[in-house]
Structures are given as structure tokens and as C-alpha cells.
Amino acid sequence: MAAGLWNCEPTEVGVVDDYKKQDPESLKELAGKLQINVTELAAQIYEVEYVRGAGGEADNDIQFISWDFGNGQTSKQDKDTVYFIDPGEYTITFNAYTYDGELSKEAETVTATETLWCAIGQRIMLDNFDDEAAYAGSWIQKHPNDVALFKDYHVDENPYQFPDDNNVLLIGKAGGWWTEVAYDFDTEVFDFSHAGMWRKVAMRFYIPSTFEVPEGNFDFNIPESYLNLKIGLNDGSGRQEIERNIKVNELDQWIDVEFDFTDSSFDQIDPTKVESIWVMFTHAWDNDRGAGRDGTGVIMVDNIELIQKVPGCLE
């Protein structure tokens, strides 16, 4: 426990004027009577407590209290728990406000050595298409009829760059059914079950309104009602999907999206044995295969991430 360091200098606290009339001698006497505790519950997790009443009559002089955890977070509770998520050194400060002035005590110095993933859910960059993928595998076409541009600009051989010097997964559509590609893991198997570690797939996408390459013109021409992006988890025998509608006003800009499988029924796959991640771009026509059959467009995908659940650090 760090030694108590009391500051009795005048401090602006944003309360009525009576609180600002400092009486240093009275504050020092009061300081020795108050009881505050800082307890380490687990690595980088602390419980703080102002033990109201333990100081006897001295506690009657306390009008209200606050904590400053040094990480941008504060609390006005007598007892609270703080998580230090990012590496660094932090000072926990206890503040007590009385009619004689403000007490500020450095109650504890905390050194956090690593990111506290159990509080936020770890994000793994599966593939940003500029570096090696986090897990060995390969991008494969999954629907034979409409993977225009995917093979011409395969990310492992001739990646398309947008903007300059930024490789992306490029998928073009020139009519046809869903455009489907997937990253098949060589050996890794991921557990997306409710008891497992993984929950979400995140990515960025960009759909240009105009797009032309030597292979052809792919200017956007898909009805909004048929414009969709899906992510699928595959266990080798089936696929669990989440679909997101895309609005026309989202064209010509990078859009960040997350596909959350937390509440999925997993009636199509064994979620403990996910061995590939599918990316599927709009079917572009309705059930009678009429509207949009000749629709064209391009989607660029970047920064595909796998996101762990937040299990709770004290489980």
C-alpha cells in the first residue's frame, strides 16, 4: 500500500463557496481518522472502499467523496471496483469534501503490465491482406458461378490495392447468385459456442459506385432491397450465417461492421468446430430470379478480425 499523501492546498471543486474555505490544521486532524482501503482482487483489478463510520465522529464532517483512478475513470461510490485495462502506471486518489476544505490522498499506485483482455474481449486481426494472416490457411472461392475478380486479384498472388499500397480482398459481381469466398484454416478450429471463447467477426467494407478494371466494368447497379453482406461460420458440414443489409447511402466510404454470433441458435453447425470463415456478397435478385439478375458491383473487404467474448475477469 502506498503511503498516504495528503494535500491541503486550496482546490477548486465546483461546489458552494463554503467548501473552499480551507482549514489546513483541521483537515490534517481529520485525515488521520478516516479509513480507506484498497484491495487487489486479481491482477490489475482493485476494490476501493471508504469505510464510512470507521472514523467515528470524524466521518460526520465528510459531505461527499470521490475516487480518481488515474485511468480516466472516477467514482462517487464509497465502495467500487476498478479495472486497469491498458498497460501503464496509475495512481488511485481518494478525495473527501468537507466544510473545512478538500482532502486528496494518493491511496495506491498500480502498475499494469499487460492488456486486461478478460474485461474487453481480445481482438485478433485474422487478415489485413498486407501481412501474413494470423492463422495459416488460404482464401478459396466457394460459389463457382460468380466470383468475378476474386481470382484475377487473388490476395495471395495479385492483390488489388485500395487506396494505394493497401491490399484488400476484392470481390466483383456480374449477375449471378451469391458471391461466396472463404478463408479455410489449415489446422485451427475455433469454438464459437456459448461456452467457448469466440463471439464476433468484424471487418471493413467499401462498395464503390463506379469501378472499372481491364477485366470489365463493374459500376454499381444492384437494387438496395437486394444488397446484402453475410458472414458464415463453417464446420465442414454446414454453415451458420448472419446477414447485414447494406444501404445505398453507404457506398463510396469505408464501413466498419461486426457480426455477433452470441445469440445464434447454431442449428446448422457444431459451433465448437468452426474451420472456415465465409464472406458472401449479395444475391442481387428476388426469389423468382427476375429483378437484379444483371446487377453488377464490387465490394472490397479489409481488416477481418475475430473477437473473443468478455468472460468476466473474476469468474
Image (cartoon, grey):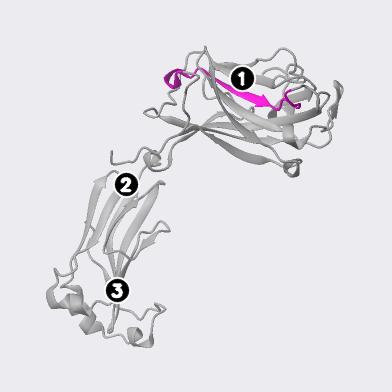
Residue 19 in view: yes
As for residue 285 lying within the magenta part, the answer is yes
The part of the chain drawn in magenta is: 270-287
Q: Which of the marked residues, 1 or 2, is nearer the chain's N terminus?
A: 2
User: Left or right: where does residue 23 sit relative to residue 216?
Assistant: left
Q: CA distance from mark 2 to mark 3?
A: 27 Å
Task: Return the x and y of residue 286 as percentages of the image width and height.
Answer: 74, 26
As for residue 191 lying within the magenta part, the answer is no
Q: Amino acid at mark 3?
A: Phe
Q: Amino acid at mark 1?
A: Ala
Q: Is residue 162 above or below residue 86?
A: above
Task: Return the x and y of residue 81 as percentages of the image width and height.
Answer: 30, 54
Residue denoted by label 2: 44
In percent of the image, x 48 and y 30: which residue is there?
Answer: 264
Q: Amino acid at mark 2?
A: Gln
Residue denoted by label 3: 64
Task: Return the x and y of residue 117 as percentages of the image width and height.
Answer: 40, 39
Q: CA distance from mark 3 to mark 1?
A: 57 Å
Residue denoted by label 1: 182
Q: Which of the marked residues, 3 or 1, is nearer the chain's N terminus?
A: 3
Task: In this rendered view, identify the residue nearer to me: 158 or 234.
Answer: 234
The quarter in which the N terminus is drawn is bottom left
Task: Return the x and y of residue 75 as percentages of the image width and height.
Answer: 35, 62
In percent of the image, x 69 and y 27: which residue is there?
Answer: 281
Displayed quadrant of residue 128: top right
Q: CA distance from mark 1 to mark 2?
A: 39 Å
